[in-house]
Image (cartoon, grey):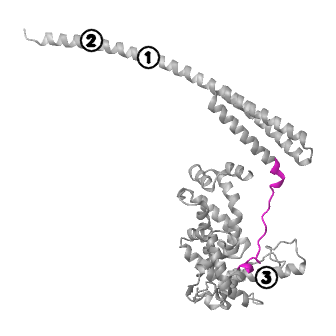
Amino acid sequence: MPNLITALFTASDEQLMWRVKLQDDAEAFASLMRRWQKPIENLCIRMTGDMHRAEDLAQTAFARIFAKRADWQPTGKFSTFLWRVALNLCHDELRRAKRRGECSLDALDEEGDGQPDFIASEGPAPDEQADNRERAELVRNALLKLATHYREVVVLRHYEGLKFHEIGEVLAIPEGTVKSRMAEALTQLNRLLKHLNGDTSCNPKTQTPELLAL
Amino acid sequence: MQSQDSNTGTAGTVKHPNSTEWMSFLYGECAPERRRELDAHLAACPACAGQVQTWRSSMNTLEEWPLPARRHARSQWAPALKWAAAAAIVLAIGFGIGRQSSNARGEVDALKSSVTELTAIVEREHNLNLSNGVAMAASANIQTLRVLGEYARLQQEQRATDQEVIKTALRSFDLRLGRVRSDLQTVAVNTEAGFEQTHENLAQLVSTSIPE
């Protein structure tokens, strides 16, 4: 019953975006942001490995959506449009970082306490927390070493929960290609995680050659 | 990848599922029947079982990079929201019935009856339950009813205002119509006089221009 009530009284993303497009409806756009800000931020964190930059990227994605509202066509899902815009921003950011010679792996924690802020402070005991942080760091590093076209598929399917066909729509590639990339990404991750223990260096020159070539 | 499939009990070769099928399998996107087939294949094929285990291992490892959990600040207001939603539904139904079956007064009556019905429901609920949660819900509901009553009153006032505006507009329109009619009559009279004058002028012109 609550779901039914929610469904009755909740406008779809597309209805809200239609209002934004035709009437510049600020409240409708605020609703879209409330729904999607967190998933888009998470996407940007997983893609760039940088929480602080991810917040800016998510904000920029929404600003770009609003700026392009007149171009939006209600033929597809709003979320497809949004994921695509956010992913393109992540790609741009990664290219810029590469040109600057930065390594996103270094940008994990700038707070100075030596602890990544994506780990909740409550819960396990300190030594267990340290172990969890270390493992999270290894996974993050491995993910960031994947070529972007593999990483985006892993992030959208595994972390954001999109179906393979939805990812195909976002990336404008066949569903079969998405699945092939996912399989290859999981294979590479398995290999990377076996070799990453004790090696958190982010110097691109030290990365696995075959991965850089992908 | 071709191999003997011991599970089939035949000597024929069996095509192994490809990686795209295994991805659908691992992420729960394949049909139940196909899932059963793939499960059976896994049980009988060590090569595929090894490959799938590798992928599963990567999937499990990905879980070790968590992000902060989202905050949920809704539970405190959930009872009030439920009551508000119920009130909105009753209001909408009452409003719809009123609109279908009656004029403006009927609509207001439908609203009032909805409010009365809700009041009765709240009183019953209030009497039956004395816990804090229910008290909070009832309080929220009374607030909702107050808002609904206010809404009904405003609706009536708005309707009266609208009727007054329409009356004024009609009076103004009537006056304008009268003026236009009067103007048209003047134009008609003037036109007729103009015709007569022209006719006379023409007759005079004809009489003076015919040679004697």
Q: Are marks 1 and 2 on the same chain?
A: yes
The residue labelled by disc 2 is B197
Q: Residue at x 78, y 34 (%)?
A: B117
Left or right of B23: which side holds A126? Answer: right
Q: Is residue B60 above or below residue A2?
A: below
Between the C-alphas of marks 1 and 3, the distance is 91 Å
Q: Position of residue A122 (x, y in %)?
A: 87, 71
Outermost residue, front direction? B9
Could you say whether the residue bearing mark 1 is in a helix, strand or loop?
A: helix
Q: Residue at x 55, y 58 (%)?
A: A72
Q: CA distance from mark 3 to mark 2?
A: 109 Å
Task: Say which residue label 1 marks.
Answer: B181
Queried whether the magenta region covers residue B60, the answer comes back as: yes
Is residue B54 in sight in this rendering? yes
Element type where label 2 sits in the image:
helix
Q: Is residue B73 magenta?
A: yes
Q: What chain does mark 1 sit on?
A: B
Tell me, yes or no, if residue A102 can be seen here. Answer: no
Using the image, name the chain to which the residue with label 3 belongs: A
Name which residue type carries label 1.
Arg
Region rendered in magenta: B59-79
Rendered residue at 40%/17% (across/down): B184
Residue B152 placement: quadrant: top right
Disc 1 with disc 3 on a shared chain: no
Amino acid type of the residue tagged 2 in the rendering: Gln
> Residue B86 is drawn in which quadrant?
top right
Residue B10: percent from left, percent from top: 58, 87
